[in-house]
Image (spheres, helix red, strand yellow):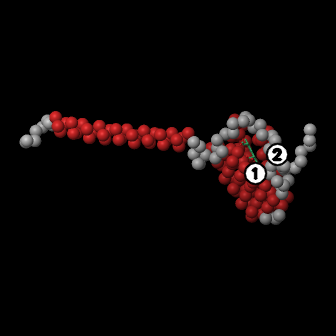
Amino acid sequence: MPPTFFPTPAEFRAWHHAWSAYRSSLMKRLLLLLALGCAACSRTSPHQPRYGEAMGEVGRRFELAGRAAAANRFELAAFEVDEMGEVFSQLPRAELPKEGDAKVLPPMVEGFRKAELPELARAAKDKDGRAFADAFARAAAACNACHVASGHGFIEIPPKPGKPVPDVDPAPSG
Ligand code: HEC
């Protein structure tokens, strides 16, 4: 049959069939993409830290910084303070804790980054044990202020370098 401008019914059916198959496979791929996207967005992305997890790291590093400074290991103290700074810089993106008053957190994170961390870092760099102990006590007070304000006052940070963080010394009973 000579080629004509209009498709024959058989050609038309073949095209229509191919197009439908293509369209439905496209639709399936789109749905799969949407499903994957939603699975990813409903879960916490690996880059969004959880508050408690980040704080666990802050606590460990603050304790280490204090123990290091108390042992004249100021380079280690400086390193731990620097690492704490990294955790604090990620806190604004962290998933807020469910309990307590979460809206007090962002300004207190900023305050801590601007006031407490630079003092700790400077004292460690200067290898100045007394300045470090002073900065440590002020930082611990700031940690505790935020814990109280956010409804976590029972997480007490000791003011003296070299002690376990948080404080697990026996509390007065009653
Ligand atoms: C901006 C407020 C804020 C500041 C500043 C802050 N914390 Fe916290 N911290 C919290 C909150 C909120 C929690 C509870 C997190 C949760 O509910 O999972 C917490 C929990 C903790 C915990 C318990 C973590 C766990 O899961 O066992 C430790 C340890 C801790 N903080 C240490 C510190 C230390 C040390 C500092 C100061 C160097 C500090 N925090 C400063 C808000 C703060």
Q: Is mark 1 within 8 Å of ligand 1?
A: yes
**Residue at image location 19% in from the left, 36% down from the top:** 12
On residue 25, the disc is none
User: Residue 29 occupies which quadrant of the picture?
Assistant: top left
**Residue 116 in the image: above or below residue 8:** below
| Ligand 1 positioned in quadrant | top right
Residue 144, image x, y percentages: 80, 44
- Alpha carbon distance from label 2 to label 1: 10 Å
Decide if residue 125 is in sight here.
Answer: no
In this rendering, would 6 be left or right of 58?
A: left
Q: Amino acid type of disc 2? A: Glu
Q: Amino acid type of disc 1? A: Gly
* Cβ atoms at labels 2 and 1 below 8 Å apart: no
The foreground one among 82 and 39 is 39
Helix, strand or loop at label 2? It is loop
Helix, strand or loop at label 1? It is helix
In this rendering, would 49 be left or right of 149?
A: left
**First in residue order: circle 2 vs circle 1:** 1
**Residue at image location 81% in from the left, 59% down from the top:** 67
**Residue 84 in the image: above or below residue 34:** below
Q: Residues within 10 Å of mark 1 (few under 14, many from 20)?
A: some
Classify the position of the N terminus by image quarter: top left
Residue 94, image x, y percentages: 64, 44
Residue 35, image x, y percentages: 47, 40
